[in-house]
Image (cartoon, rainbow, N blue to C red):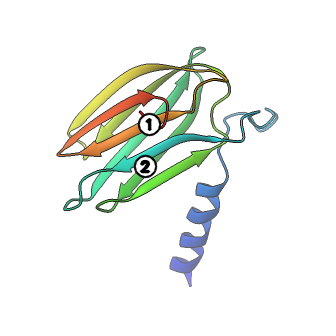
């Protein structure tokens, strides 16, 4: 029974964006903010993603496992502003980059494949 409860709790947590301040209003963006895509059709990857605002507040800190060819999306995480994305692929490769999110930006794309990770402004580059 405990295992089932853990799985449902994880699913609920994945669907609800976490905020560090419960009094903070939800994001004004209702679009897909972050798309994580594994282009490798033979290997799955562990990925850690930490997103920090310009004021150093962490707005997202999550671990993922992506099966070969799998994509995952996050909604309602990012208001317009400047963010630092720190990603760690399989506890080996790290990348830290800054991205600007504004009304014209379609979010942030994190791509995996061939043992590499990249982060781009805009989902559909």
Label 2 vs label 1: CA separation?
Answer: 16 Å
Q: Residues within 10 Å of mark 1 (few under 14, many from 20)?
A: many
Write down the quadrant of residue 41 in the picture.
bottom left
Percent of width and height locating residue 90: 25, 47
The quarter of the picture where the N terminus appears is: bottom right
Determine the secondary structure under disc 1: strand
Q: Are marks 2 and 1 in contact (CB under 8 Å)?
A: no
Task: Report the residue at 34% width, 41% height from top.
Answer: 111
Q: What percent of the width, then of the height, locates residue 65?
A: 36, 57
Q: Secondary structure at mark 2?
A: strand
Instruction: Name the residue rendered at 60%, 14% in the picture.
Output: 55
Q: Is residue 111 left or right of residue 6?
A: left
- Residue 67 figure quarter: bottom left
Which mark, residue 100? none
- Residue at image mark 1: 109
In the displayed structure, would residue 88 be above or below residue 45? Answer: above
Image location of residue 20, percent across then percent down: 66, 35
Judge by depth and name the residue closer to the eye, 12 or 114.
114
């Amino acid at each position: 029974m405990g295992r089932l409860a853990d799985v449902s709790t994880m699913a609920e947590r994945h669907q609800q964006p976490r905020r560090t301040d419960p009094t903070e209003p939800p994001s004004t963006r209702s679009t897909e903010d972050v798309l994580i895509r594994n282009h490798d059709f033979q290997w799955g990857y562990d990925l850690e993603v930490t997103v920090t605002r310009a004021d150093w507040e962490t707005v997202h800190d999550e671990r993922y496992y992506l099966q070969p060819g799998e994509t995952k999306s996050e909604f309602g995480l990012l208001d317009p502003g400047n963010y630092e994305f720190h990603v760690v692929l399989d506890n080996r490769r790290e990348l830290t980059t800054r991205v600007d999110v504004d009304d014209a930006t379609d979010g942030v794309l994190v791509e995996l494949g061939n043992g590499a990770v990249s982060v781009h402004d805009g989902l559909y580059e």
